[in-house]
Image (tube, rainbow, N blue to C red):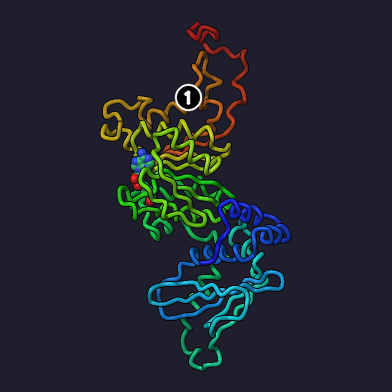
Amino acid sequence: MQTTVDRAGLGRLISAAGGSADGITAVIDDLGADAVAATVVGELLHRADVPAGPDVAVQVGLRHGDATIRYGLQVGSTGVAHLPSGAGEPVGTPDASLTQDLTEVVRSLFGPRGAQSSASRVVHWGHLEDPSAFDRPLPAYDVVRRLVDALDRPYDIGLAELCVRYGSDKWGHHTYPRRYEQHFGPLRDQPLTILEIGVGGFGDQHRGGASLEVWRRYFPRALVYGLDIVDKSHLTDQRVTVLQGDQSSPTDLARVVEVMGRPDIVIDDGSHVSAHLLASFASLFPVLRHGGLYVMEDLQTSYWPTFGGRAGTYDDPATSLGFLKTLVDGLHHEEIVGRTPAFTDPDIGGVHFYHNLAFVEKERNLDGGAPSWIPRGVRQRAGVPD
Ligand SMILES: C[S@@+](CC[C@H](N)C(=O)[O-])C[C@H]1O[C@@H](n2cnc3c(N)ncnc32)[C@H](O)[C@@H]1O
């Protein structure tokens, strides 16, 4: 495996992909074309989802300046492998070759909606001189079709389909994708930092990561971070970083923020223990970027004492839903006479409740209340009825 660019380099590449071709080329030169090509091929293969099948050899050529960096992709009964061949002559006789400018490939994979282009692409088929190739589709057709779709249509796949593909229970057992798409759809082509608490697989170190793959794929320009109390760091890969820590520990969360920077989206799908949800929110909401979203899943546990919830009362602010309900009052903090300020008050832009799921929007909430001359029916200073 050739060296890929590191996380900071990937962030730069993603940002550049939203700008001019010259800007992308300059960043490629700075990071090293070979490392960028290795990164791009890894991303391309991840998105292409090429299944195991008959033997097919495809050569991917990435043109940069005078050089073409070539990779051999070998599909077979065990899946797909890529064999770096470096700049130089092709390896063997491929069933197909796909050659495109590296700058254009970077922009297609990591650029916003509408930035995709195939203007520099050349596709050659290896066996068209064999008349039998016209009787049936060549196995190479589907492989190249998948690569081309990954480049040309990075935003064409839906969240429910991704959850089924990667095995996240967000779809099926739950029906969250419709709500996620409602809130995440407008952000989908932004260069985001996303943290999900709860990687999945619980005590089994070798299981989990389904939803991190979902987010990586749904947000083609995002850097995705996962936090789990169990060490699942082996799931770390190009755009996904998996950290170990306890979501109820402010120290662990501070370490996560140190590595990740300020997130644009936080999704809490961890222990579902109310006190843990509240502790994570207290540490992470203040560092969430304005315009960002904080999501809590599986809020039914707020009613279940085994998860630190309350069975008989619904407004206890020590439970997850009881706490979230207090944010509705926080939205109106400037209208409430004599309110004891909550740390969230200046930053609550909206709270959206769905079955077992809530989204909190972070926005400046300091526009001022209604004019002071409107009688409130309470004494402004004492906070008691007139
Ligand atoms: C429901 S699974 C996450 C599923 C995953 N988000 C998905 O959709 O594919 C919950 C995960 O939270 C982790 N977890 C439990 N307690 C935690 C804690 N205190 N801090 C961090 N992670 C925790 C568990 O190890 C488990 O892997």
Q: Looking at the picture, how far across and down is residue 275, in whole percent? A: 36, 31
**In the displayed image of the protein, which residue is found farthest to the bottom?**
131
Could you tell me how many numbered marks the image carries? 1
Pick the residue in front: 293 or 222: 222
Q: Looking at the picture, how far across and down is residue 196, in whole percent? A: 44, 45
Residue with the mark numbered 1: 329
Residue appearing at x 57%, y 34% in the figure: 363
Q: Looking at the picture, how far across and down is residue 332, in whole percent? A: 52, 24
Pick the residue in front: 257 or 279: 257
Residue appearing at x 54%, y 51% in the figure: 222
**In the displayed image of the protein, which residue is found farthest to the right?**
22
Residue appearing at x 62%, y 57% in the figure: 111
In this view, 341 is above or below 20: above
Q: Quadrant of residue 90?
A: bottom right
Residue appearing at x 56%, y 47% in the figure: 192
The amino acid beneath tag 1 is Asp
Q: Quarter containing ligand 1?
A: top left
- Decide: few, some or many residues near mark 1? Use Cα within 10 Å; few <14, some 14-19, many ≥20: some
